[in-house]
Amino acid sequence: MFDTLLPTKLYLPSTRGDWVARPRLLDRLVASPRNKLILISAPAGYGKTTLVTAWLRQLPETAVCWLALDADDSDPQQFFRYLAAAIRPLPDVQTQLPQLLQSNQAIPAKTLVKALVHDVTAVATPFVLILDDYHAIDSAEIDGALATLLDLMPPQMTLVLTSRSDPGFPISRLRARGELVELRADDLRFTEAEAAKFLQQTMGLTLLPKQIAALEARTEGWIAGLQMAALSMQNRGGDLDGFVQSFTGSHRFIMDYLTDEVLAQVSPDVQAFLLQTAVLHRLNANLCDAVLNNHPSPISNLTTQQILEHLETSNTFLISLDDERRWYRYHHLFADLLRQKVSAATAKAIRQKAAVWCAANGLVEDAIEYAIGAGAWDTAVPWLAENGLKFLFQGKLTRLRRWYDAFPHDLLVQQPRLCLDYAWVLVNQGEKDAVEPYLQAAETAAHGAPDVRAITAIIRANNARAFENLPVMQSEAELALELIPLDRAVARCTALAQLGVVQLMAEAGNLDKAVSLLEETAVLARQSHNMNTAFLAGGYLGLAHLLRGEVGVATAVLHETFAFATGQGLGQSPLLTYVHLGLAHLAFLAGDLDGAREEIAQVDAHCRFANEASGLLRSGMLLALVEQAAGNKEAVRLALNDVAETAVSIKNPNLTQQIAFLQEVVYQPNPNPAQLEMARLVAAGASLAYAQAVVQPETAPQEQPLVDPLSERELEILVLIAAGLKNTEIADKLFISLNTVLYHNKNIYSKLGVSKRALAIAKARELGLL
């Protein structure tokens, strides 16, 4: 898992020996159990990262976990992969998080953060986790996960954020409890004394006190502005007073002005080097040579590597990303300013060259990034087609989504492989409703190729299962099995699972067939290491055994499936949804209402994350029964409201009858035990017809003074006749057809020797049947 990550994001940046010491700020940074969060929040160029690295260098007894963030880390799966890598060197750290991330299924961020807490709780020594440039994260899910981390993290851990803005989770409670250390722009500004030391010691300038004071006042202690001003002044003789007076205004205006001044102080070749290499996200000597066409060194007698080292040591906003000084990047603010001065045509040409070099050197993600940035779609297509599924399995959903969204739509829909991978991304991000256009585009572009149609069938069947569209699920799964070769077990077991679910849920289904198909699926999925399908099949298989009344077998299957998933480090996988639903039913059957609620809550969380409407519906039905058993009328009402809301997206043609039946049962003061059992079976996924067929009323046979006694169904209808219900109302209430009611009425009248309703009621009362 870790070999797909950029190691440079995990390196603590180096600290210059001649940088300005800032004891007034360092004294405020204390890693202790009381200080859960250290937040350093200020706009670009205030020295946030520099301050933190200087502080960390003076903590020899504290372990440091560093992660430099960028926009792609807004993908929760990628964010936590990097976090797992960052904490990996800690002594005694556990491995639940990396094991959980091995799943090809997206895992909720709050689940992942709990695994992180589990892993670091075993670490006895104090440690600091630094998330640098947290403002790059645009994910409410990650914000929520960090809020959970701050609630749960062990006392030996301190979280540090550097950011241009406050995080998306609330910090007021931490502030009120004294658990937050904050440094902001006003704290980070250079004082006049610090500015003097910086200009003279770090930048090597000899200035008068009044000039230093003027510069500090003009920049308001903004470190990036002072640095740019100093660079502009290094090669300028004469009128420094005039230079100091010549710039004023906003930070952005000052930086634009000073960037021009810095570029004016260097040779045209160095200007070209800065401008062209600023287009690169990160750079090393070989990559620079490739995009600059290996032209002679812009600085006499220096190699490109020496140029990079020279730029770093001369404070030209170049930052080393590793201890070997192989990889670098420009300060984000400086790079943005330089890129504004590069023409679109030049930037495109550089990105195209960078893409080719990265591909040749095994940096496929960078190659795709540059190719897409250059609009070189034909170049990017084969790399994405070859690697998209691999990136999907690595959890890089946000990056893939961004790449696919960048493609011109007309071009994307001509690429079957890209459309299929995009569809899988949408499925994994819970956007199942957006999938179908890309499946159709893949089929059209592939001109009916069987291998493409097989994959679209699997995706359609899986989506249909999530919304209980049983006809589509069956037809697509059967087609997939026709098209998929026998040796492709991973794909075949996925299709088999869908057919098993059809047999479990359909009115014309066969539960024995369901068990057989799901057992075959579970074995085949484990053999082919298709963990997602193995978990799905195990959950449905447990439910199937419950529907057959085999509680002991169901218990064994469900617990074994969960134990297997946990053993793989995947105990929090959303594909265990139906395992948890089965465990909720077992708890309910055992009278453990709190246990049932806990399992239902887990189902609810997984389903809302993955847009799994079927699981949400069935768990809501069971919750209504749980609350009915507990006598919580308001909770019953809320549960049924949730069921009705979810039902809007469900395609099961028999759902209306199922919900009506459930409502009648739970709203009765003393529901018939047989009806309660039928409702529970429906909440486990059974059709109402199946539930009616297997559940026998628990009432004792009634003695009847009739030669030909009334059947249980006829007695049930007789009671409703006596209650004044019309035939159509009786049909609706018992979920039978009107013809069936009329047939039973005829038998009732015949056995009682009457011809009318009123006479039937009177005769029944006379005989003690009512």
Image (spheres, grey):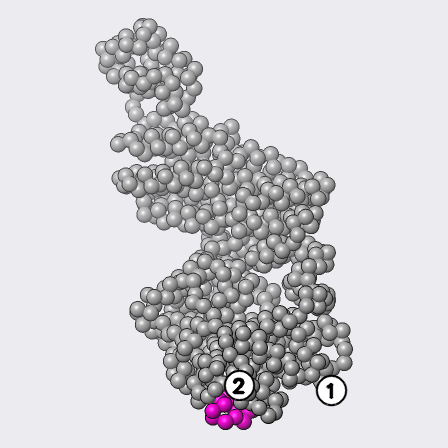
Q: Taken as a whole, is the magenta stretch helix, strand or loop?
A: helix
Q: At which x and y percent is residue 729? A: 36, 20
Inspect the magenta stretch and tell me whether residue 211 lies in it. yes
Three-letter amino acid code at the position of disc 1: Ser
- Give the residue at x 63% y 55%: 406
First in sequence: mark 2 vs mark 1: 2
61 versus 597 height, above or below: below
Which span of residues is magenta-colored?
Answer: 198-212
Mark 2 sits on what residue?
Answer: 244
Q: Is residue 107 above or below residue 127?
A: above
Quadrant of the image containing the C terminus: top left
Q: CA distance from mark 2 to mark 1?
A: 32 Å
Image: 449 above or below 267: above
**Residue topped by disc 1:** 300
Q: Secondary structure at mark 1?
A: loop
Q: Is residue 484 visible?
A: no
x, y (%) of residue 106? 52, 54
The residue mark sitting in front, 2 or 1, is: 2
Residue count near mark 2 (Cα–Cα under 10 Å), binned few <14, some 14–19, many ≥20: some
Q: Position of residue 34 (x, y in %)?
A: 34, 73
When asked about the image quadrant of residue 684, the answer is top left
